[in-house]
Image (cartoon, rainbow, N blue to C red):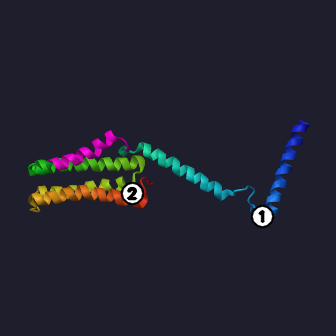
Amino acid sequence: MHRLRHKAKAKAKAGRLLRVLFLRLAAVPAGSGRALGREWCGVLLRGVITVSTDTDASTRDWLRSPRTSLLAWWVPYGAIIATLFAPVPVRATIWTVALVWMGVACILNARRCGRTHCRYTGPYYLAMIAPVLLLAAGIGSAGFWGWLILGVLILAGSRGIWWATEHAWGKFSS
């Protein structure tokens, strides 16, 4: 038992001597008590947490799964394009259902994993229901070209939002 206490005291003395040597050589600030200081540990820990949450978020992302991505976004896109030549009541119904479907999928995906562009494209898809209903009600006499322009605005607009938001704020944000 005596030997253990003696070894512990010797280790502590060696640690103090090493600290004095580092202080003398100005390798460590006087109040740090450790070689890297506390701020370095915090930066390192924050970096580990950030990497960890990005990895966790990407595993929960519905866009990562081809099947889910197909069902949630690509099938509705295809339905919008396919019904461009359908009668106006059918077109308006399909487009409204597709926009609700994609908007809700984006909002749920944003809540699930924090995907940046989904925070903006979800409400965008839901807002695009208003012009679809206005054209369907005949409030604006646009004809085929009006519907075509609206379809391009919906699909290209969502792609623009996706590109701009993920370039500005990254793939995942909190």
Q: Image point 36% across, 55% down: which residue?
A: 117
Which residue is denoted by mark 2 in the rendering? 166
The amino acid sitting under disc 2 is Glu
Q: Main secondary structure of the magenta part?
A: helix
What kind of element bears circle 2? helix
Horizontally, residue 17 falls left or right of residue 157, namely: right
Sort mark 2 into few (<14), some (14-19) or many (20+) by Cα contacts within 10 Å: some
Amino acid residing under circle 1: Ala
Q: Quadrant of the C terminus?
A: bottom left
Of the image marks 1 and 2, the number of the one nearer the N terminus = 1
Query: Badge 1 is on which residue?
Result: 26
Numbered-mark total = 2
Residue 70 image-quadrant placement: top left
Q: Does the magenta stretch include residue 135?
A: no
The one of 1 and 162 positioned closer to us in this rendering: 162
Point out residue 105 in the picture as x, y percentages from the top left corner: 31, 47
Q: Find the magenta span and give its range.
A: 64-82
Q: Are marks 1 and 2 in contact (CB under 8 Å)?
A: no
Mark 1 residue element: loop
Residue 103 rendering spot, x and y as whole percentages: 29, 50
Task: State the residue at coordinates (12%, 60%).
Answer: 145
Instruction: State left or right for residue 109 relative to residue 7.
Output: left
